Image (cartoon, rainbow, N blue to C red):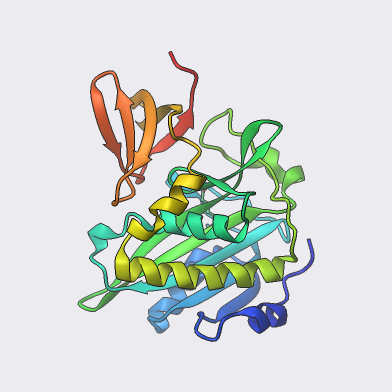
Amino acid sequence: MEALDPHIIHSQLRPEAPRVSYFEVVTSTNEVLKDILRQSFSPHVVLASQQTRGRGRRGRRWLSPKDAGLYLSYGHITHRPVDTLGPLSLVMAISVATVLPDVVHIKWPNDLMVKQDKQWAKVGGCLVEIMTNPGTSTAAILGVGLNLHMAQHLTNQPADTPTQLWADLPLLVDPSTLVAQLVNQLHLDLAVLEQDGFGPFQARWETLHILRNQPVQVTHSPTERFRGTAGDINEYGQLAVTTDDGLVWVSAADVSIRLTHPS
Ligand code: BTN
């Protein structure tokens, strides 16, 4: 991959967008961002060419070899109550899909997917963590990983299911431009979410949502799983799943979901 260039990134950032700190190697951009926020509780972005301990959802590792993907964490300060922050991770995925129009779709809650040989394959994902500053505000650490030249490493990537397909993102712009576009888009979208909630995103979500009307299996734990048909999401970002016993609203935390064949 073309090397990331902080000068190109900064030249394309909107003046009001948060600054981007670039590192060649970090443990995890989410962890470095948390350290920065402990010093200064204000919006900030951490970007790296390589992570030695990249983390995925549900305690998985996230393979992050040098220059094989984008590894970025955006620190967003919010004044919304912590129990209303569910849609943050959906909005992050929507922002990514918005800067990659007609290419990236979303598997709820925030898997970034592309169509490859008539099948959906994962090109990236989002890991959102919350950090509170007692009495004042909350920081959301919005981490995103996108595969760019991961093909030779992908066999080692832990997946939600053994049938998970992986792909590299077909990139039409240089990665530094993509980073600037993404930071600008996140800045705009997060301001809308802060002010108006998830409502303004519903229409965009519907064009990107690949699970609607699809048979799915929802897994809370190895012993707790059920099948149903996925529907839409509500203003809290929960997914409607119709089962034989009725409608269930599923929250993103600690759930994995996969497309299945009807049983
Ligand atoms: C997933 O499991 O789908 C989410 C993957 C999130 C990976 C990104 S890479 C940048 C940031 N730093 C991390 O350690 N994880 C996230």
Residue drawn at x 29%, y 51% is 236
Residues 71 and 92: in front is 92
- On screen, residue 97 versus residue 110, left or right, reads right
Q: Quadrant of the N terminus?
A: bottom right
Q: Position of residue 238 (x, y in %)?
A: 32, 44
Residues 157 and 89: in front is 89
Q: Is residue 238 visible?
A: yes
- On screen, residue 236 versus residue 126, left or right, reads left
Residue 181 sits in which quadrant?
Answer: bottom right
- On screen, residue 231 versus residue 16, left or right, reads left
Q: Position of residue 131 (x, y in %)?
A: 34, 67
Q: Is residue 59 visible?
A: no
Above or below, comparing residue 244 to residue 154 in the picture: above
Q: Position of residue 37 (x, y in %)?
A: 41, 77
Above or below, comparing residue 90 to residue 121 in the picture: below
Above or below, comparing residue 168 to residue 31 in the picture: above
Residue drawn at x 33%, y 57% is 199
